[in-house]
Image: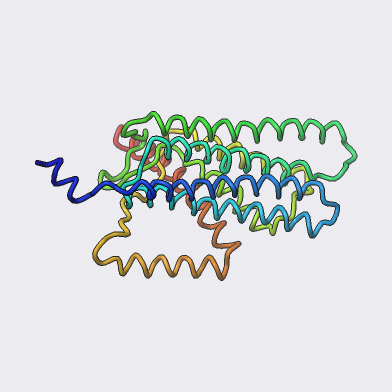
């Protein structure tokens, strides 16, 4: 009886509807390819303005890919067209768009554009170190996806409110979004200072660590767009979109770094609370 009622509430979708979520996933893969192409173009163009524009276009494409990645899952759930094929395709798309493409962009933008200095040996070592760090970002993102795919009801080490759902570790789209937000904030202008490049690599490495950590990050899955009275949610969404459109560089940086810091603060607060209870 329960299964019959569920079937009436969620009738099987038509076969053609299963293509709809995969179209958004394919769009995410296309954006990943575009990011790679723009990153390479920005690294080989001699014109500084055109080079910065190419890097900036790659960073903005990551933001659009995050939107596509969020839509394909929600559309699959809303249309009842979730499938094993769609899940596998989505994971492969995430590795390309939020793993391979951002790691290449991070290296070409933050390390490869350093001008010749008086210390070529140090610069060469930094180049090699940058390759390793950006590759580790890619590996951490792939491990994060693999852990997410095999986990059943994962619980973070620092549990939060029981009425909220959390990700265990920073999601790979958010990790790529942090790198993209910094690059877009700088207008795509690559790093030309050795010490700033080291700070950039530290951010890339720390973001990779957060992806494979067991710290909690807000998932937003409790947001229900199909509610009967989504007025407040729609108003908030319109305000956020308006702020991003008007002040895109600052707004995207604040959102990305704010999400990163939220996981760190949640972990520190939980550790401090445990110490206080133990004392």
Taking the spot 33% from the left edge, 55% from the top edge, the residue there is 223
The part of the image, by quadrant, that contains residue 49 is bottom right
Quadrant location of the N terminus in the rendered image: top left
Q: Is residue 194 left or right of residue 34?
A: right
Q: Nearer the viewer, residue 104 or 30?
A: 30
Residue shown at the point (29%, 59%) measured from the top left = 226
Q: Position of residue 168 (x, y in %)?
A: 40, 37
On the image, the x and y values in percent for residue 154 come to 34, 33
Residue 18 rendering spot, x and y as whole percentages: 39, 46
Q: Is residue 112 left or right of residue 119?
A: left
Where is the C terminus found, in terms of image quarters? top left
Residue 256 screen position, x and y as percent = 52, 52
Identify the colour scheme used: rainbow
Q: Residue at x 60, y 47 (%)?
A: 179
Residue sitting at x 64%, y 58%:
185
Query: 150 or 189: which is nearer to us?
Result: 150
- Asked if one can make out residue 131 in the rendered structure from this viewpoint, the answer is yes
């Amino acid at each position: 009886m329960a299964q019959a009622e569920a079937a009436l509430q969620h009738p099987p979708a038509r076969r053609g509807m299963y293509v709809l979520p995969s179209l958004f996933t394919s769009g995410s893969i296309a954006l990943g390819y575009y990011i790679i192409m723009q990153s390479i173009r920005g690294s080989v163009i001699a014109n500084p303005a055109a080079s910065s524009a190419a890097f900036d276009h790659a960073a903005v494409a990551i933001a659009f890919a995050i939107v596509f990645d969020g839509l394909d899952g929600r559309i699959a759930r809303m249309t009842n067209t979730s499938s094993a094929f769609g899940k596998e395709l989505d994971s492969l798309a995430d590795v390309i768009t939020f793993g391979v493409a951002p790691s290449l962009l991070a290296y070409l933008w933050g390390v490869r554009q350093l001008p010749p200095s008086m210390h070529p040996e140090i610069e060469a070592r930094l180049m090699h170190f940058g390759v390793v760090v950006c590759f580790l970002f890619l590996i951490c993102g792939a491990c994060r996806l693999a852990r997410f795919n095999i986990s059943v009801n994962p619980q973070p080490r620092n549990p939060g409110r029981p009425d909220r759902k959390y990700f265990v570790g920073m999601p790979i789209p958010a990790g790529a979004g942090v790198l993209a937000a910094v690059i877009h904030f700088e207008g795509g202008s690559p790093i030309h200072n050795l010490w700033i490049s080291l700070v950039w690599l530290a951010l890339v490495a720390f973001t990779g660590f957060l992806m494979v950590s067991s710290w909690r990050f807000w998932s937003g899955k409790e947001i229900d767009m199909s509610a009967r009275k989504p007025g407040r949610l729609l108003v908030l969404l319109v305000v956020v979109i308006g702020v991003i459109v008007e002040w895109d560089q600052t707004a995207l940086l604040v959102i990305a770094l704010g999400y990163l810091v939220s996981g760190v603060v949640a972990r520190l607060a939980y550790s401090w609370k445990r110490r206080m209870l133990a004392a």
